Amino acid sequence: METIEEAAESYLQEWRLLNNIHLSNILHAERCKNDFIAGAKWQQEKSYSEEDIEKAHFAGKIGRESFNIWFEQFKKK
């Protein structure tokens, strides 16, 4: 699985190619990568855990078996 840092580098490279931009300014390139990483980490912190979702699900009075089926369907792989 790709790390956030590796994904940031891939994103930067694709962006440069798509926009036909040669980033000779190292500071600009590093800033782009750091912004990507910060955004990914922020999103990761805002995600719910499996336990959080399970508690919310059962608060709605739905059975455990149906939760497990539902969770597997939408689980990140």
Image (cartoon, rainbow, N blue to C red):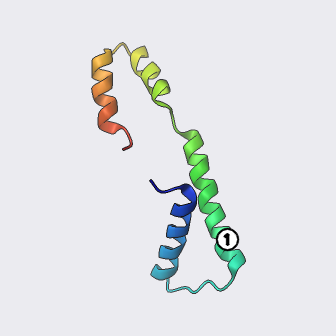
Name the kind of residue labelled 1 in the image: Glu
Left or right, residue 74 beside residue 8:
left
Left or right, residue 71 beside residue 11:
left
Left or right, residue 33 beside residue 77:
right
Find the residue positioned furthest to the right.
Answer: 27
Q: Examine the rendered structure and indicate whether residue 70 appears above or below residue 58.
A: below
Q: Which residue bears the numbered disc 1?
A: 30
Question: Is disc 1 surrounded by few (<14), some (14 to 19) or many (20+) residues within 10 Å?
Answer: some
- Please name the residue shown 62% across and 66% down the image: 33
Left or right, residue 39 beside residue 66:
right
Task: Pinpoint residue 74: horizontal percent, then vertical percent.
Answer: 34, 38
- Please name the residue shown 33% across and 23% down the image: 67
Q: Examine the rendered structure and indicate whether residue 46 appears above or below residue 17.
A: above
Task: Pinpoint residue 1: horizontal percent, then vertical percent.
Answer: 44, 53
Q: Examine the rendered structure and indicate whether residue 45 appears above or below residue 7.
A: above
Number of residue marks: 1
Task: Pinpoint residue 36: horizontal percent, then vertical percent.
Answer: 59, 61
The quadrant where residue 64 appears: top left
Find the residue positioned furthest to the front.
Answer: 1
Q: Quadrant of the C terminus?
A: top left
Task: Pinpoint residue 57: horizontal percent, then vertical percent.
Answer: 40, 21
- Please name the residue shown 43% across and 22% down the image: 54
SS of the residue at dot 1?
helix
Q: Examine the rendered structure and indicate whether residue 28 appears above or below residue 24.
A: above
- Please name the residue shown 30% across and 29% down the image: 70
